[in-house]
Amino acid sequence: MNHAQTNTEIPYAALQKKVSLLERECQLLREQLRLLRASKYTPSSEKSDIHSQQMLFIDNQVVELDSRDSTPHASPENERKAKRKGKREIDLSRLPLRRIDYEIKEEERICPGCYGPLHEMDIDVRRELEYIPAKLCVVEHATHIYACRHCQAHSPSTPIIKPPAPKGLFPSSLASASLLAKVIMDKYVMHLPLYRQEATFGLKPLLSRQTLSNWIINASDTWLLAIYDRLKAHLLKNHVLHADETTLQVLHEENRKATDKSYMWLYRTSGCANNPCVIYDYQTSRSSAHPHNFLSKFEGWLHADGYSGYHKLEGISNIHIVGCWAHARRKFDEALKATPEKGRAGSIAAQGLAYINRLFAHEKEFLSLSACERYVKRLELSVPIAKELNGWASTHLVLPESLVGKAIKYLLTQWPYLMRVFEDGRLELSNNRAERSIKPFVIGRKNWLFSNTPNGARASAVMFSIIETAKENCLNVYEYLKYLFEQLPNITISGIDGLMPWSETLPDYVKVH
């Protein structure tokens, strides 16, 4: 009897285990399917989409979401702002004006009724914006050389006099400051690949993609690298930075396949900086050695995501890594989207998301405060919420493979870095500042796909650094690049400080008013 029971119990236990594994796998697959559907058919915003104010049961206490944690449609801040009165006039005043007057000739200003003289009683003005297509023209810089005929005839040496003339960008090149600025602007701001620019110009082989590429690389190496080095030196003097990285494909790297991944690293100043600065750095890998080398002279706070390569910096330099609460929120947001709609209200994912939303809501309230005031307010209002969240997360046992399990695991493993934000009022709750700055490169990469050589990748890093820093300092990118290319060949190294994006000596037409 016992023997028979054993024979029947063993397969039944194995079957139960198998059913349990299949149920878990099915649950994980359903989660992934719901998340894929959400990413395809719903907005990508991480803000909570639960319109009703759910009652979340946490530690047997009822916590009601504050109105500021609700959908963005309920917040007056997110409503469409009415256009400022007179804004159209301000915008039009920035453009050159060409006026066409339609008048009656003096001798024809006679009243058809009484034949008396007519006077001008009003002017009916109709405005329109005219588009003037760009065009290429040849400019010859002819320097006249003078000599003395008397000295030529009677002296052993003849003085030769040349008037001063501005130097060109490259010897025997057709590249002008305006044309080179346009090529760079179109590629790195408008994300227009060089082969499309080549077709637009229609002057192949005079302006082939190879010629344009050579111009960009030469401009970087010859002129803009000095600006880039000054930007980097300025960046490292700050005490609060942000960092991020993204992939890049470079076809012809030494001892590497064309399909191997390279990386574009990004470092930028935080919101507390007087002169914002953005630096891109091309490297062949994602090794922590790259940020370590780049930041070797930096001391202070570094905002970063959860990549362990950044965490290694703490052991070898005086850098304190600040975690990103937006990444933690993103994990819970994904888990919530993967939860069946009927079970979202009061779910573990919704509870975790509600906690973090309360932190971000407080940050909006602290925007106008000074760093010291913000530090005090965070200790008073935000730190208790964070500690409560940590206690809540530590008590929930869920499948580690599930999305909500991964969200909780990320939160707890990143906890020491996430809590760093409360140690200094200058720090920010997220690393979104770096993500916004690296986005132009990501958009450009989707268009031109790859860099052909490491020289091209380094040139792209220099161009993006100068362009994004110019944007941060409210400069007109095209006018600034053009001004740089006009000035750099004709100044000494000591004059570069006057060309920096925050220099007060920059002409007004370079600045966006």
Image (spheres, rainbow, N blue to C red):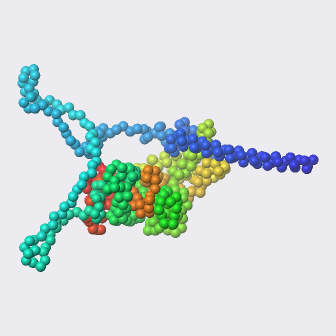
In this rendered view, identify the residue nearer to me: 121 or 37: 37
**In the image: residue 114, left or right of residue 10:** left
Residue 378: x, y in percent?
49, 53
Task: Depth check: give the residue in front, 455 or 105.
Answer: 455
**Side (left or right) of 257 relative to 195:** right
Residue 297 spot, x, y in % from top left: 44, 68
Give the vertical position of 245 relative to 402 (above or below): below
Which residue of the protein is positioned furthest toward the front in this rendering?
A: 205
| Place of residue 462 in the rendered image (x, y in percent of width and height, measured from the top left) | 39, 60
User: Total marks drawn?
Assistant: 0
**Residue located farthest toward the top when viewing the structure as drawn:** 113
Left/right placement of residue 445 relative to residue 343 reads left
Q: Which quadrant of the view contains residue 62?
A: top right
Residue at the image point whose x is 54% and y is 58% from the top = 307
Residue displayed at 75% across by 45% down: 19
Residue at image x 69%, y 46%? 24
Judged from this view, the residue extending furthest toward the bottom is 156
Decide if residue 424 is in sight here.
Answer: no
Q: Residue at x 12, y 74 (%)?
A: 158
In percent of width and height, residue 129 lies at 27, 39
- Front one among 251 and 402: 251
Camera-nearest residue between 63 and 131? 131
* Residue 341 appears anywhere in the view: yes
User: With respect to residue 61, does 189 lie above or below?
Assistant: below
Q: Is residue 85 left or right of residue 2?
A: left
